[in-house]
């Protein structure tokens, strides 16, 4: 077996990867959607978005793979990042570099591999978009072009995630500029989301912007499913950590301009300006998927967590203090709970 050597620019490459701040983060719905399409298009058993990090390759996105990472020394992708071109291994058992690789001889029994590099913000090759199958095969020229297209799309997602993170940092910077007393009054101390008072303070500026830009004012009312059971069985300390993680996932799922709120207890909310109710429902579904995507790990506990959400929209001129808007979303949330939880219902 030929182990992959680090590229000559390994230090710069690793720094470029770390600038994205996506290692060991929850699954991304945009990347997962691309991988579902890729799996249908290419017909391979496995499609992956891999990141080469130190002595491991970690999977930011995966379809048809139970592992979350593998050692770099065993990785095919560690070889693929040495060149811009697609690396294709039509039959790993016939390739002297890989024929005795444990990933070929044992699970997941790789026979076919094709990988194309993905890039960090500075342009270094930080990982791959790759296809894996248990039978030998050969890419057509159309499939090669499709791989290049998918790689460009995934690079675009990486850039969008970095832009979003920078916008969030700017927003946090603005929040820090608030006086300590004002900040304590407007932010929830546990999750650092806006609280109800913060919502009321910000509502008027959102309404004015909606009037200027002819947008609708939308509200998402969300409630963690079976949260009382977590508190009762595992304690409020575990429940608090679940809320903190849920708040972080909510922030990651909404847009930079949306207002993420802890309304109280296990109730969360989002104030958003949208073109129509469909757009608000898409945001709510992103939140639902982000909450349920990965287990929440607290100490020795690995918890499956879901959330129910209700949505409502209003013309800016009808919002007033937001009471009716929030009430309609709350009623939709109640309907989501009654319908079985872990779903979005429109009000």
Image: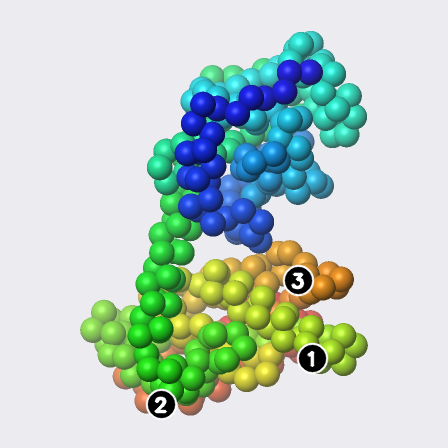
Q: Are marks 2 and 1 in contact (CB under 8 Å)?
A: no
The picture quadrant where one finds residue 151 is: top left
- Of pointers 2 and 1, the one earlier in the residue sequence: 1
Direction from residue 85 to residue 306 in the image, left or right: right
Give the structural element (helix, strand or loop) at label 3.
strand
Name the quadrant of the N terminus: top right
User: In the image, which is nearer the foreground, mark 2 or mark 1?
Assistant: 1
Q: Give the Cα distance between marks 3 and 1.
A: 15 Å
Q: Residues within 10 Å of mark 3 (few under 14, many from 20)?
A: some
Of 31 and 179, the residue lying toward us:
179
Give the structural element (helix, strand or loop) at label 1.
helix
Q: Residue furthest left?
A: 212
Percent across and percent down for residue 134 are 71, 24
State the colouring used for the structure image: rainbow
Q: Say which residue label 3 marks.
A: 296
- Of pointers 3 and 2, the one earlier in the residue sequence: 3
Residue in view at x 38 percent, y 62 percent: 168
Residue in view at x 61 percent, y 34 percent: 55
Q: Say which residue label 2 marks.
A: 321
Q: Say which residue label 1 marks.
A: 236
Q: Residues within 10 Å of mark 2 (few under 14, many from 20)?
A: few
Q: Give the Cα distance between marks 3 and 2.
A: 35 Å
Give the structural element (helix, strand or loop) at label 2.
loop
Q: Residue furthest front?
A: 11
Q: Residues within 10 Å of mark 1 (few under 14, many from 20)?
A: few
């Amino acid at each position: 077996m030929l182990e992959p050597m680090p590229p000559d620019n390994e230090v710069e490459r690793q720094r470029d990867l770390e600038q994205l701040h996506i290692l060991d983060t929850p699954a991304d719905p945009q990347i997962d959607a691309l991988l579902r399409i890729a799996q249908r298009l290419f017909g391979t058993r496995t499609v992956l978005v891999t990141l080469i990090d130190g002595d491991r390759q970690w999977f930011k996105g995966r379809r048809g793979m139970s592992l979350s990472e593998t050692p770099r020394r065993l990785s095919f992708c560690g070889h693929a990042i040495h060149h811009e071109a697609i690396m294709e291994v039509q039959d790993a058992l016939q390739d002297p570099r890989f024929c005795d690789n444990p990933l070929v001889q044992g699970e997941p029994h790789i026979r076919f591999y094709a990988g194309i590099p993905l890039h960090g913000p500075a342009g270094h090759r930080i990982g791959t978009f790759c296809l894996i199958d248990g039978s030998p095969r050969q890419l057509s020229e159309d499939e090669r072009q499709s791989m290049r297209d998918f790689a460009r799309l995934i690079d675009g997602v990486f850039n969008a995630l970095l832009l979003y993170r920078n916008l969030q940092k700017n927003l946090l910077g603005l929040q820090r500029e608030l006086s300590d007393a004002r900040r304590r009054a407007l932010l929830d101390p546990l999750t650092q989301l806006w609280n109800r008072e913060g919502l009321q303070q910000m509502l008027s500026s959102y309404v004015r912007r909606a009037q200027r830009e002819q947008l609708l004012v939308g509200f998402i009312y969300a409630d963690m499913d079976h949260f009382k059971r977590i508190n009762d069985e595992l304690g409020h300390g575990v429940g608090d950590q679940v809320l903190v993680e849920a708040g972080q996932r909510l922030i990651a799922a909404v847009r930079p301009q949306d207002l993420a709120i802890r309304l109280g207890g296990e109730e969360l909310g989002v104030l958003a300006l949208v073109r129509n109710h469909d757009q608000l429902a898409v945001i709510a579904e992103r939140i639902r998927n982000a909450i349920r995507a990965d287990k929440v790990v607290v100490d020795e506990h690995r918890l499956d967590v879901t959330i129910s959400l209700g949505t409502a929209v209003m013309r800016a001129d009808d919002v007033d203090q937001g009471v009716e808007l929030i009430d309609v979303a709350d009623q939709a949330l109640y309907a989501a709970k009654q319908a079985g939880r872990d779903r979005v219902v429109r009000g």
